[in-house]
Image (cartoon, coloured by chain):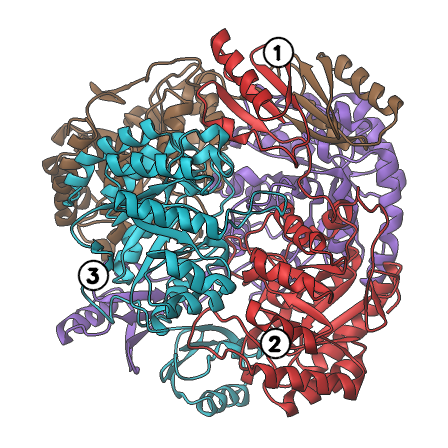
Chain colours: A red, B cyan, C purple, D brown
Amino acid sequence: MIIVLKPKITKRQETAVLAEVRKLGYQPHVIRGVERVVVGCIGDERSHPTLETLMTWPQVENVMRVQKRYKLVSREAHPADSTVNVRGLVIGGRHFHVMAGPCSVESERQLMATARAVKQAGATVLRGGAFKPRTSPYEFQGLGEKGLKLLAKARDEFDLAIITELLSEAHVELVAHYADILQIGTRNAQNFQLLAAAARTGKPVLLKRGLAMRIEEWLLAGEYVLANGNPNLLFCERGIRTFETYTRNTLDLSAIPIVKAESHCPIVIDPSQGAGRAGLVAALCKGAVAMGADALLIEVHPNPAEAWSDGAQQVTFDGFARLMSELKPFIAAAGREA
Amino acid sequence: MIIVLKPKITKRQETAVLAEVRKLGYQPHVIRGVERVVVGCIGDERSHPTLETLMTWPQVENVMRVQKRYKLVSREAHPADSTVNVRGLVIGGRHFHVMAGPCSVESERQLMATARAVKQAGATVLRGGAFKPRTSPYEFQGLGEKGLKLLAKARDEFDLAIITELLSEAHVELVAHYADILQIGTRNAQNFQLLAAAARTGKPVLLKRGLAMRIEEWLLAGEYVLANGNPNLLFCERGIRTFETYTRNTLDLSAIPIVKAESHCPIVIDPSQGAGRAGLVAALCKGAVAMGADALLIEVHPNPAEAWSDGAQQVTFDGFARLMSELKPFIAAAGREA
Amino acid sequence: MIIVLKPKITKRQETAVLAEVRKLGYQPHVIRGVERVVVGCIGDERSHPTLETLMTWPQVENVMRVQKRYKLVSREAHPADSTVNVRGLVIGGRHFHVMAGPCSVESERQLMATARAVKQAGATVLRGGAFKPRTSPYEFQGLGEKGLKLLAKARDEFDLAIITELLSEAHVELVAHYADILQIGTRNAQNFQLLAAAARTGKPVLLKRGLAMRIEEWLLAGEYVLANGNPNLLFCERGIRTFETYTRNTLDLSAIPIVKAESHCPIVIDPSQGAGRAGLVAALCKGAVAMGADALLIEVHPNPAEAWSDGAQQVTFDGFARLMSELKPFIAAAGREA
Amino acid sequence: MIIVLKPKITKRQETAVLAEVRKLGYQPHVIRGVERVVVGCIGDERSHPTLETLMTWPQVENVMRVQKRYKLVSREAHPADSTVNVRGLVIGGRHFHVMAGPCSVESERQLMATARAVKQAGATVLRGGAFKPRTSPYEFQGLGEKGLKLLAKARDEFDLAIITELLSEAHVELVAHYADILQIGTRNAQNFQLLAAAARTGKPVLLKRGLAMRIEEWLLAGEYVLANGNPNLLFCERGIRTFETYTRNTLDLSAIPIVKAESHCPIVIDPSQGAGRAGLVAALCKGAVAMGADALLIEVHPNPAEAWSDGAQQVTFDGFARLMSELKPFIAAAGREA
């Protein structure tokens, strides 16, 4: 770590900092600059206590980290791209995947019709919420296990892998029993207990970025999965919260090249949640493909106007088929296979 | 709800909207304006499906809610201020309360010294984390039950109520057994399963605002507590995430008059997390008192530079005693009792 | 406009609102809903005073606009895409354009070398700052007119159109004399006097989005250009300010389909300013092309490490040539010509 | 500056960085840490070119500044509080000042009535916009010079100092002729040409914080005023843009202790723009006073519902008189004189 001292401090104040640095296990190294004295502190920042606590001292102006805080998810730890195997599908490799399905599982009829439609159009993974985190307690909270059973039935019938959200530690075994990929939603992106519990099932985990998460924090949340012995991690960007109100969130597509630079894990883009408006989904998908995303997660519904949740962002069957066809030249341009 | 139709749509497109509105249980009411047709839809927005799903229709320009989505926490439901009773302390009444203590419980010695210091300076509630949500898996995660036992011991010795964070559904019984107030942290502010489980213990719940939560969403998260049969809810503002980097977060003090206007529940301010810098805590506390907060939640540590978590924002014993004394005239000016 | 009244108000309070609505030139239309009374106010919101001022009245809960505030820039006003002609180049048509060059004009040698390099790689417009808005008064402020003359010389030598920033009303004539496109920077995006003055020159105006501008406000700023008689407007997204610190700004690529939906004007993407990191530029350009941008604005420098401004985001000649070649399949996939 | 090198780079790559550092005028100082090599670069960061440009080099991981970028506005440059003299009023001293008046000057009758009311209630400075920056070109743009003349008349009649906004370089002489304080609005906070022109008049300048300005950038914008020879600078916080939509902006009251710590210049709070809702103004004023603000800037109008601009945030005469009386105990508690 680097400690910047304030100008015009006493020798004694400086010595006290050096003593504290040594006490906390680092070796201080003083550089006298033009206006400031800087102390380089040698020692592993991940195994020693942080020196940022010295910020409370009157003679300290700033404390800066040098090392990155994440380890197992980092590109340094694993220079090649890692891939995640889901029922034989390889995510993060040459094949580009599309995960699609309704926001919520509502009924057998709705789910089966959607599964058929997305399969025909080229999706390889079926999404659908059985347990739904809802902003208001008065909104539909999901079909629960009944929904999971319907997803399993759709998997069997249409040979699609299944992704569904896990939102409670109490449901870990239940959801892991049915799902092929466990989705951790944006509201639980720093629910570290849930992350650890999901990781321990060994199932692939798709970790959505929290609404207000810096990329560093998102990578560190992913670190909870790998540090709990599960290498099958997918990052999923789904929009961050900004001041813009035209869209529900601002989809941060720059997360694609950044995650690719900092980590070896695959990255998935969810344009439906990001935009909150079905009319923007196609353009966002094209951008995501061109920028190097490994997969898309798209909400599709037989009749969005009557969806039980988030209808405004779900696309129709026709819209989805058209989108899949429009994406093809971009998938090819990106050097992937559809 | 209000539906704004696009200009130049056909009669048939308009009729389709009216039919769908009726199908979803509302009674449509057409207003023909200068440039737009607006449809007022009469019906209870909380018991009927939302019409926002109609946003996917090409003839619909916008859909706006009319009713507020929260109910039990709202000022309309309970025009008088509500109060929360904690071991005989009344929060939300005439007496102004200060909750203080270390970020993390680290040892018996640290906790007892801090409890003594904050009690002497006038605090009525002792805070201290036993289970800590940490951004990185490599950081100190709390003493767990050992920490809870130390808190209980401090309570007995110094006659202070105890507040501590609950961060796992698996710990609900354990934490509720020891704590007088259950704190739900910012990262779990929309972990609805945890909120419901905390509510069902009947213990007072202090709900921190999520880093990216609009006040409406925060009130709705609080609604999960009241809707689960627990009226003892305290809202706690602790800073929201903005572009500013001088502070860790931006403490949104305007939340005080807003929560007072929209809800009957008490509001607590946490300036330590908000600023992330001990040097700003005193000014933020004064502002909070003047603006009508019901209590403060302040981090105090015997030696912040050696704290095991968040040292940069914790104040010393001397600093805390000075702060409590400086607050007195502001508490009086606000018509409260210290 | 729509006025939502509070519940439980008196008949007299309601009547007062209706009287005020009429006084301000609207015809009120009352809808009695389940919990709220809503007043639809018929009248042109752009020629009458806003009713939002009624928000100060105790009986009023909310006031909502129905009409869009922008007019000339809107897709409604001009359903077809508009194009901007710059020295014979048509921006907004089938041909995809790349504007490239240094952040600041530093010397004849630097500019000519860059002009040659970008021309060879396929750029059609040369960018370069002669007057630079700098966060600190101690940073390089640009070469001024000398820089403009160098740009003109490069235009003649390499047959490139010239875009340069206008940042002062005092320079309007001077800059318009040399430039083919006047760039209004992010810090002046709501400097309406400057916008109007730029518009009156008749030269094409490229309007960057302000760091904290909602898209609606950006369109309204563009409205100042068209309302001053100049239809040659290009919108340019260059990143908005969010909490993320990995990048300098968050490039909001969703602005592309939104501006295309709301307006007829061409849209340009500036990935250099958006990311602030040269390593992200290529991916962002690919995304922009795929999503339907009409042009790119890219910073290129012979030796970024020694650039006099914003070196971290400028790409080298080799990097630019490689990028132009990598973009080709995406331009084709987007149905454009390179 | 501090340069952090990437791990596993070659000796030659390291040497190249050291050579470039020397070439740009700094003396490099290498520290070999556990995982990273760090280069401390000794030299004045304000007179040498920035090393941040090295971020484009593949072997460089990060570059960090050590020095603060502002100089004349900094507390280091002038350890005591500075004060600004306005027609004999001393802002920044023991006396607490209130600046009040309408958002826009609309008519003689409106302005005189307001001037009388605010004077009676205790304000010492009259505010009022003659030139108005409006988001839409179709909104009222101010009375111009006629408005300035009315302000001058009100000054004579009621012995109030006058503050009004300057929004064009073309108006500098005109506005400076009438005004006692030149206000630079939030949209022009980084219009450096305007700042310099305002500074050169010698009149006190009140600089509002831009909607998306970090405090460091705001201080640097203030530096443009002092660096142009004018020490009479007032900073004014008026709300920053965040994701919250209940308020128009989020008033960042923590700016008060931060500006007091970093700078010697007085700080003024504008709660009207910050909240955008008159009902929140009183609480925000109390907070500002308690936290150490030197003055308030409050919008007051005889009939807010009929105001020509921003009616929703203006308070009535009665409301203002009540507010001034409610503020008294807080002003006393803050050790100031009303």
Instruction: Give the CA distance from mark 1 to mark 3.
Output: 57 Å
Q: Are marks 1 and 3 on the same chain?
A: no
Distance from Cα at disc 3 to Cα at disc 2: 39 Å
Say if labels 2 and 1 share a chain. yes
Q: Quadrant of the C terminus of chain B?
A: top left
Q: Nearer the viewer, residue A125 or C166?
A: A125
Badge 3 amino acid: Asp
Chain containing mark 3 = B
Which residue is identified by label 1? A33
Mark 3 closeness class: few <14, some 14–19, many ≥20 residues within 10 Å: few
- The relative height of residue D273 versus residue B203 in the rendered view (above or below) is above
Q: x and y percent of residue C231 in the render? A: 60, 53
Type of amino acid at the residue the image marks with label 2: Gly
Q: Are marks 2 and 1 in contact (CB under 8 Å)?
A: no
**Measuring 76% from the left and 21% from the top, which residue is drawn there?**
C107
Label 2: how many Cα within 10 Å (few below 14, some 14–19, many 20+): many
3D distance between C-alphas at marks 2 and 1: 58 Å
Residue tagged 2: A129
Residue denoted by label 3:
B81
Task: Residue B142 in the image: state x and y as whole percent.
Answer: 51, 47
Q: Secondary structure at mark 3?
A: loop
Locate the N terminus of chain B and report the quarter of the image it occupies: bottom left
Answer with left or right where residue D93 lies relative to residue A10: left
**Chain identifier of the residue bearing label 2 in the image:** A
Which is nearer the N-term, disc 2 or disc 1? 1
Q: Amino acid at mark 1?
A: Gly
Please report the residue visible at 64 percent of the width from the left and 13 percent of the height from the top. Answer: A31
- The location of residue D41, given as percent across then percent down, is 69, 16
Dot 1 falls on a residue whose secondary structure is loop
